[in-house]
Image (cartoon, rainbow, N blue to C red):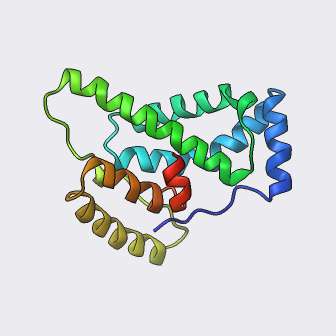
Amino acid sequence: MSSYQPLLLESQFATILAAARRNNAWAFERLYTGIAPAVVGYLRLQGAEDPEDLVNEVLLGAFRGLPGFAGDETAWRTWVFAIAHRRLVDDRRKRSRRVTTAAIGSLDSWEPAGPGTEDDALGRVELSRLRASCEHLSPEQRDVVLMRLVADLSLEQVAQA
């Protein structure tokens, strides 16, 4: 299902990361646009109340933590999704205090990105299958499935997250 393409070549990623650490706005924009759509998709499929707002919190936290981050683009994705997962858990706790029952999430509002009609059609079929599968999973199982399929993380990266 994932249409993840690496953000940049490793040498470019290192350059952009260094520029972000020097507070260059263009570097933050590149990091944000490279990962935000996948994080929004993950959060939306997980039933976040406001996934667009939550992704901003996730990436703001990631940007604030850049001085302590070490690694390549793969490590960056793993780290950001670990932050996203923690923020999602916090969001669920906050909502559970206000609401007595929690829904699986609005899987209808997430659309896979694709450049053409065929990709859109295949994405909708895959999304329909994903929707049906997620309804029968525990929250922990759903986390793993969505991190693998939406975030395109490896099993090792999911375990780290």
Residue, far bottom: 118
The one nearer the camera, 104 or 90, is 90
Which quadrant is home to the N terminus? bottom left
Residue at figure coordinates x 30%, y 32% from the top left: 92
| Image x and y of residue 121, in percent | 39, 74
Image position of 43 (left or right of 10): left
Instruction: Judge whether 15 appears above or below 66 on screen.
Output: below
Residue 152 in view, yes or no: no
Residue, far left: 100
The one nearer the camera, 146 or 117, is 146
Instruction: Judge whether 158 appears above or below 26 on screen.
Output: below
Q: How many marks?
A: 0
The one nearer the camera, 40 or 14, is 14
Residue at figure coordinates x 75%, y 28% from the top left: 67
Residue at figure coordinates x 45%, y 34% from the top left: 86
| Image x and y of residue 76, in percent | 66, 46
Residue 149 in view, yes or no: yes
Image position of 69 (left or right of 87): right
Instruction: Judge whether 16 appears above or below 138 on screen.
Output: above
Report which quarter residue 10 is drawn in.
bottom right
| Image x and y of residue 89, in percent | 37, 34
Report which quarter residue 97 is drawn in.
top left
| Image x and y of residue 19, in percent | 84, 35
Residue at figure coordinates x 78%, y 37% from the top left: 26
